[in-house]
Amino acid sequence: MKLGVNIDHIATLRNARGENFPSPVHAAFVVLEAGASNVTCHLREDRRHIRDNDVRIISELTKKLNLEMSADEKIVEIAIDIMPRSVTVVPEKRKELTTEGGLDVAADIKRYKNITEAFKFKSSDSITSAFIEPDLRQTDAAMEAGFDFIEIHTGRYAGETNETGRAKELEKIKRAVEHALKIGLKVNAGHGLDYKNICDMALIDGFEEFNIGFSIVSKAVFDGLESAVKEMLGIIKAAEFAKFQSIKNPNSVIARSVSDEAIYRR
Ligand code: PXP
């Protein structure tokens, strides 16, 4: 399982002072050097963090950009011009703090089909992904719309504090992964994943990649970006190893080494 690191908040920090540092381009190289497979950025319509030029430079220099974007016509046009390695279509509301919920592909399959076809027309190697809830109807719609991947929105699972609710969310995610693989989609996951809850996710079979931003950038404030990325990768690899070795109750073994203290220096 691979790790894509979302570096939007490096740009948030840069923009807070109107400076040209810390540089998202620099961050992109650091996360890739640390072992991430992809760099993820969200070019929002209000350009609150990542800007057009960041996307252009990161895509050109690294060739490993996963661009999150809304289905807005102007944003799609920019993405088709830049042609990052992959694009993930997400819902976007102007006032939200971060992406809220998954895309309703089923509501307008034709609209999303136009987008996936436009990317395939420009390059048959292009990779498109739809950020959706762990929902079988949305998964079928993503397939019908021509997406290569779905990215399962893990926000509801991550935000669930109740054990039973959490187990229910996890079950939904497992079912969505199985269904997606069965109908021919590849599967990523992201949103709200951190150094503790990633264990549950990495123990599920079938994911290609996790896209994680806020928890890694938060840890990087204290420990540095390279170390924060490596630690996340270490947990993912440990979970994969535990699964491979059929270790009983692997979650507790892995999570025990990752205390809240160690993560965010609370
Ligand atoms: N995946 C998608 C589609 C997102 O919109 C985001 C947030 O930008 C993430 C992953 C990363 O979420 P987080 O910052 O909570 O790790």
Image (cartoon, grey):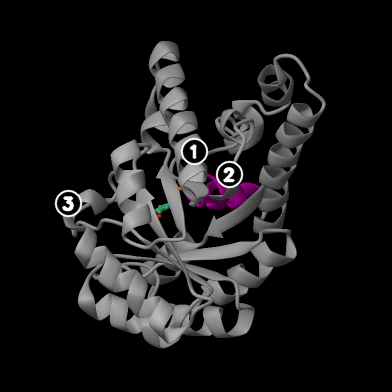
Label 2 Cα crowd, 10 Å radius (few <14 / some 14-19 / many 20+): many
Tell me the magenta residue range. Answer: 211-223
- Horizontal side of residue 157 vs 228, given as left or right: left
- Residue 107's tag is 3
- Quarter of the C terminus within the rendering: top right
- Horizontal side of residue 254 vs 182, given as left or right: right
Label 3 Cα crowd, 10 Å radius (few <14 / some 14-19 / many 20+): few
Q: How far apart are marks 2 and 1 (CA)?
A: 7 Å
Identify the residue at image location x=28%, y=46%.
Answer: 100
Q: Give the amino acid at mark 1.
A: Val
Q: Give the amino acid at mark 3.
A: Ala
- Horizontal side of residue 203 vs 177, given as left or right: right
Q: Give the amino acid at mark 2.
A: Phe
User: Chief secondary structure of the magenta span?
Assistant: helix
Q: Is the residue indicated by label 2 positioned so its CB lies within 8 Å of ligand 1? A: no
Q: Is residue 121 above or below residue 131?
A: below
SS for dot 2: strand
Q: Distance between the residues labelled 2 and 3?
A: 25 Å
Identify the residue at image location x=66%, y=44%.
Answer: 232
**Quadrant housing residue 117:** bottom left
Residue 31: x and y in percent read 65, 62
Farthest front residue in view? 183
Residue 86: x and y in percent read 49, 69
Identify the residue at image location x=30%, y=83%.
Answer: 77
Q: In this view, does 122 lie above or below 257?
A: below
- Residue 177's tag is 1
Marks 2 and 3 close (CB-CB < 8 Å)? no
- Residue 207's tag is 2
Marks 2 and 1 close (CB-CB < 8 Å)? yes
